Amino acid sequence: MNTVKSNMRHILFALMAILLISNGFAQPPRGNRQPERRIDQRKEAIEARRVSYITTKLSLSPEEAREFWPIYNEYTRKVDEISEGFRKQQETLPDPEFMNEQQAAQFVEAELKRFEQSSTLRREYTEKLLDILSIQQVALLFDAERNFNRMFFREAQRRHRQDTWDRDNN
């Protein structure tokens, strides 16, 4: 009788383990967008901080802000499109250390083109912003962008170090 109970326990345990393991490998339902939502929320929080930081650094009046942000947002969207196009093109190439001559030439040309497009875009939108802002505010904008990115990068590094430390010490 004890062996039957023992066998039943082993069978039940094995079935539960199989169910738990198979459930762990199952794909989430198609409608599950939790990770995407978290990423979107994080992007929105970063964007809100960036808007606040730049608005403060430039001392934008409400009128200036109303004219500035649509132009600046259009500029950043176009910069993102240039970068995304570059990233997609680079996905088709191997890592630079494993490239042949032709692939390396493609890579270098694409990188130069990206810088040229970004530079042209920067000049075009700087001229548009000078219709709204003073030259001092545009200089402050360039500085604020650089400082915000630096600050954000440092925070990410700190978070990564903390996460690594937490993981290694738990």
Image: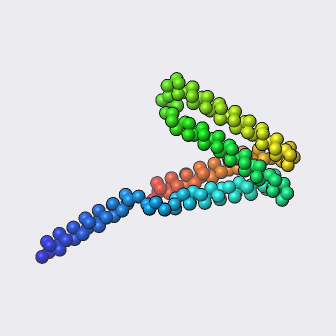
User: Quick one: quadrant of the N terminus?
Assistant: bottom left
Query: Residue 165, image x and y in percent?
Result: 51, 54
| Residue 99 in sight in this render | yes
| Residue 95 in sight in this render | no
User: Quick one: quadrant of the C terminus?
Assistant: bottom left
Q: Which scheme is used to colour this image of the protein? A: rainbow
Q: Could you tell me which residue is drawn at 77 percent across and 53 percent down? A: 69
Find the residue positioned furthest to the front: 30
- Considering depth in this image, is 162 or 124 the residue closer to the camera? 124
Q: Identify the image quadrant of residue 6.
A: bottom left
Q: Could you tell me which residue is drawn at 71 percent across and 54 percent down? A: 50
Callout count: 0
Query: Residue 25, image x and y in percent?
Result: 37, 57
Question: Left of 65 or right of it: where is 77?
Answer: left
Question: Left of 58 or right of it: where is 81?
Answer: left
- Considering depth in this image, is 94 or 165 the residue closer to the camera? 94
Query: Residue 169, image x and y in percent?
Result: 47, 57
Query: Residue 26, image x and y in percent?
Result: 38, 59
Q: Identify the image quadrant of residue 56.
A: bottom right
- Considering depth in this image, is 133 or 29 the residue closer to the camera? 29
Find the residue positioned furthest to the bottom: 1
Find the residue positioned furthest to the left: 1
Q: Could you tell me which residue is drawn at 85 percent across and 57 percent down? A: 63
Q: Could you tell me which residue is drawn at 60 percent across and 42 percent down? A: 84
Q: Identify the image quadrant of residue 53.
A: bottom right
- Considering depth in this image, is 24 or 84 the residue closer to the camera? 84
